Image: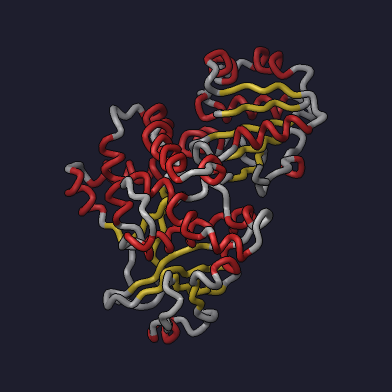
Amino acid sequence: MIKRYYDDLTPFIKENRALIIYGPRRVGKTTLLQNFIKKTTLKYRQDSGDNIRIQDLLGSQDFPRILEYAKGYELIVLDEAQYIPNIGMGIKILVDQVPGLKVIATGSSSFDLANQIGEPLTGRKTTLTLYPISQLELLQMDNKHDLKEKLEDYLIFGGYPQVITSQSREEKIQILEELVNSYIFKDILALQQLKGSKILLDLLKFLAFQVGNEVSLNELATNLAIDIKTVGRYLDLLEKAFIIFRLGSFSRNLRSELVNKSKYFFFDNGARNAVISQFNGLDSRNDAGALWENFILIERMKKKAYENIHGYMYFWRTYEQREIDLIEERDGKLFPYEFKWSAKNMVSPPRNWFLTYPQSEKFSVINPHNYLDFIA
């Protein structure tokens, strides 16, 4: 069993506060809850947002009914809370009106849960995001040498728990295809009342082939034969459902710098490859560089989230095609990073970067030799 970074939820659970755990589907949120419940000495009750009775009760804003539901318990655990209408108000009633009560709620989709919980629970919640398994977590089981030996596997099949623990290539592919076909759109289709997933899947396929490149909303709209506002809405939904994430462009000084441009990456390499049904080895594919960039970015995001490294992430590019893969802005400083799958090539920073941003920190190249120092 792989030990998760948030293996013990105790430090995050406070009286009269809610712990909200977000994350993609199938990353282990329910397992995390079950492991905690097995060890807790708190008197608890556990329910699921899939339960119609729970939806009716906690979505009712009926104080007497909700307080009666919680009476005698020290902890309320709600899995799949995004399906409960007005869940933010329901949890607010619980944490405000029941002295000493603790609440944990999980959601596989942030867009509905976040909208409902944000304002009602201001100052009353702690938020954690659980990702597919990170290299940081795997380093607790394997040493750096062993992790590097399995690098190609992670680039192709990603980090979903079921995928990592599967023994065969065929089983990994089957799990990832099921993930894409059965789970990946479930929240969007259920909560946004969309008629079907074909356009969403077509959009994802386009993005999968564009990993590492700037994306034009106009080009997406033309290719999908839908209007640009709909493209923007779908991108927002996919991002809030933890399927893709957006990397914006960095610009402060140069008129030649790209502004209002974005790149889109996937929360998991395996999910990306499942979208386009490509699981062949790196020696027989032409997108190794894109897989490497996607892998490093999401692993860096995991490390920053888990270790509370605060700061913003951007890419940088000029109209003359001078570029840097990642700019991190933290503690008032700029940190430029370039990602290279081939460690043989010498890479120098664009000259106009340091002319424009002389206060920038040292330019670093992340390659298969040194990547674990950056992400784990």
Residue 260 in sight from this viewpoint: no
Nearest the eye: 299 or 240: 299
Residue 301 in sight from this viewpoint: yes
Asked where in the image residue 89 lies, by quadrant, the reply is: top right
Find residue 246 and report its horizontal and vertical position in percent.
41, 54
Asked where in the image residue 90 lies, by quadrant, the reply is: top right
Rendered position, 334 above or below 149: below
Rendered position, 325 above or below 59: below
Q: Is residue 215 left or right of residue 94?
A: left
Q: Residue at x 48, y 37 (%)?
A: 109
Nearest the eye: 69 or 61: 69
Find residue 120 and report its horizontal and vertical position in percent.
59, 34
Nearest the eye: 245 or 255: 245
Find residue 353 and report its horizontal and vertical position in percent.
41, 81
Quarter of the picture holding the C terminus: bottom right
Q: Is residue 151 left or right of residue 291?
A: right
Asked where in the image residue 225 lies, by quadrant, the reply is: top left
